[in-house]
Amino acid sequence: MVFGFWVYLMTDCIIFGSLFAAFAVLRNQFNGGPSGHELFELSGLGLETALLLVSSITYGFGMIAAHKNEISKVIMWLGVTFLLGLGFVGLEVNEFAHMIHEGAGPDRSAFLSAFFTLVSTHGLHVTCGLIWIVTLIVQLMGTTEIPERMMNKLTCLSLFWHFLDIVWICVFTYVYLASMI
């Protein structure tokens, strides 16, 4: 089960690699629209990044609790991870709404189209991870021990969640920071 999930993550790497390549080609195609330097605010991005990175730590605490068969702690740490991830997605949606309200939607320029596609694909993955977290919390409720199959599910979600952190670090560095220079 875990090996198959590694294969899935490799296909996700291809998807994100393709989106980063498209962004690289289109990053200077503003067509009279605003550039990243004009749009992005580092303070909000720092909070988004902190929420996602801390959520990786809390998920790690959940995995430690799972290995100790401490189900209530697993549920608690998954809940904290969920709230941090939800905060991340909320800030991202707010950023998109603000940009669109300011006339900087994906239809404005090739740069913005590539930006929205890459960042929203990451956001969609985080949202899927949040749904997965809720599913595992529900499955863990009322159980007295964590069977191997559940541990495999928790491990796969751990791989996915940490992968999303790595992708976000790349997005933050290459899309946001590099565009602000």
Image: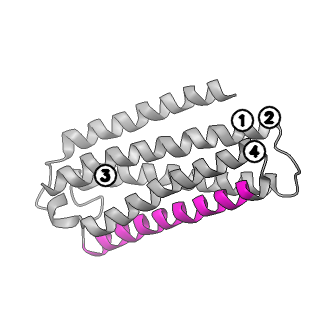
Residue bearing the label numbered 1: 152
Residue 35 seen:
no
Residue bearing the label numbered 3: 172
Quarter occupied by residue 50: bottom left
Query: Chief secondary structure of the magenta span?
Result: helix
Tell me which label, 1 or 4, sits earlier in the chain: 4
Q: Residues within 10 Å of mark 3 (few under 14, many from 20)?
A: some
Q: Nearer the viewer, residue 49 or 26?
A: 49
Q: Residues within 10 Å of mark 2 (few under 14, many from 20)?
A: few
Q: Quadrant of the N terminus?
A: top right
Q: CA distance from mark 1 to mark 2?
A: 6 Å
Q: Residues within 10 Å of mark 1 (few under 14, many from 20)?
A: some
Q: CA distance from mark 3 to mark 2?
A: 36 Å
Disc nearest the viewer among 1 and 4? 4
| Tag 3 near tag 4, CB within 8 Å | no
Amino acid at pointer 3: Phe
Q: CA distance from mark 1 to mark 4?
A: 15 Å
Task: Looking at this view, name the residue that lies furthest to the front.
Answer: 68
| Residue at horizontal 22 percent and vertical 40 percent from the top | 24
| Residue at horizontal 50 percent and vertical 43 percent from the top | 162
Amino acid at pointer 4: Lys
**What span is colored magenta in the figure?**
73-102
Tell me which label, 3 or 2, sits earlier in the chain: 2
Residue bearing the label numbered 4: 68
| Residue at horizontal 24 percent and vertical 67 percent from the top | 41
Disc nearest the viewer among 3 and 2? 2
Residue bearing the label numbered 2: 148
**Residue 73 placement (x, y as % from top left):** 72, 57
Q: CA distance from mark 1 to mark 3?
A: 30 Å
Amino acid at pointer 2: Glu
**Residue 92 placement (x, y as % from top left):** 41, 64
